[in-house]
Amino acid sequence: MRAASHSSAQIETFLEMMAAERGASPRTLEAYCRDLDDLAGFLKADVAKAGSDDLRRYLASLKHAALAPRTAARRLSCLRQFYKFLYSEGVRTDDPTDALDSPRLGRSLPKFLSEDEVESLLAAARGIEGIKGLRATALLELLYATGLRVSELVSLPLAAVRGNSGIPKPTIIVRGKGNKERLVPVGDAAREAVAAYLTVREAFIPAKAKVSPRLFPATGRAGHVTRDAFSNLLKEIAARAGIAPTRVSPHVLRHSFATHLLARGADLRSLQQMLGHADISTTQIYTHVLDERLKSLVQNSHPLAKLKL
């Protein structure tokens, strides 16, 4: 990886260190190279000699160019690592990024679909003919009913879902992040979809394997439907439903599950347990829904809310 000709030679040394010692991916190295090259182009000077004021002017130019705060924060992170590297190597006697403030990121709200849009997705999945349609419907119904992470969904063991009688269980044990287990309830619609899929599940077991411990077996190294395969399937279903595929992903459905539950009266603590969040502060990204519900509650229920002034 080589920096542009007008950039300092130290950029290339920094990138080599990031690759060799930090194990930075090629994509990360390319991003760092672009960021530092952009700074060099702005300063029209050796970036290794830039001072705090130079960097402040550069960051101000990013703000003036309406660069997203998160992108600006990523560029500042790159600069901090670069100048800390120069300081540690003795190239500089100071770190000019010490005096810089990080840009405010604000609070990004989770993207989610409306209840009608989710129903359109489910209807589109049900419209797929044959055994693939049964599997697609089971995947979507189960994801929306439980809010599982996509990795948890596609790797579910058959035993976690199918009871001794062969009927899908009303609750399933999910092994999530940190190898922690949690109990997640499953609604009737999802259980019916899974029951229908179980009648054809064996058709998806690779011939060489003969048996599979996974609920959603497939060919390939993982032995089950992959995250990418499911994401692609979801986008195909979105197109069938007349919803822009770019708006739909497994995580958007997880957000939709949480948003719709809160909108219908669920509490944050219960939602935290179902989503498998270690800290309730993570679950609190959904409080925008609670804010809207409280406004509606006051507007519709308070005895003075409808008085005309």
Image (cartoon, rainbow, N blue to C red):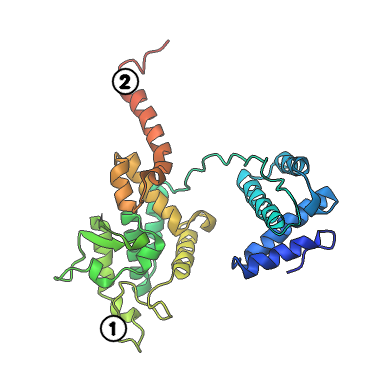
Identify the element where label 1 is drawn.
loop
Q: Amino acid at mark 2?
A: His
Q: Position of residue 60 (x, y in %)?
A: 73, 39
Q: Position of residue 163 (x, y in %)?
A: 17, 68
In this view, the residue in front, 286 or 43, is 43
Name the residue furthest left.
165
Q: Is residue 237 left or right of residue 49?
A: left
Q: Where is mark 2, residue-wise?
A: 302
Q: Is residue 89 left or right of residue 111?
A: right
Quarter of the image holding residue 54? top right
Q: Where is mark 1, residue-wise?
A: 211
Looking at the rendered image, the quarter that the C terminus falls into is top left
- The answer to whether residue 134 is visible is yes
Compared with 42, 131 (above or below) is below
Instruction: Choose the circle earlier in sequence order: 2 or 1.
Output: 1
In this view, the residue in front, 160 or 278, is 278
Q: Is residue 56 left or right of residue 202?
A: right
Give the CA separation, mark 2 to mark 1: 60 Å
Packing grade of label 1 (10 A; few <14, some 14-19, many >=20) is few
Q: Position of residue 121 (x, y in %)?
A: 41, 57
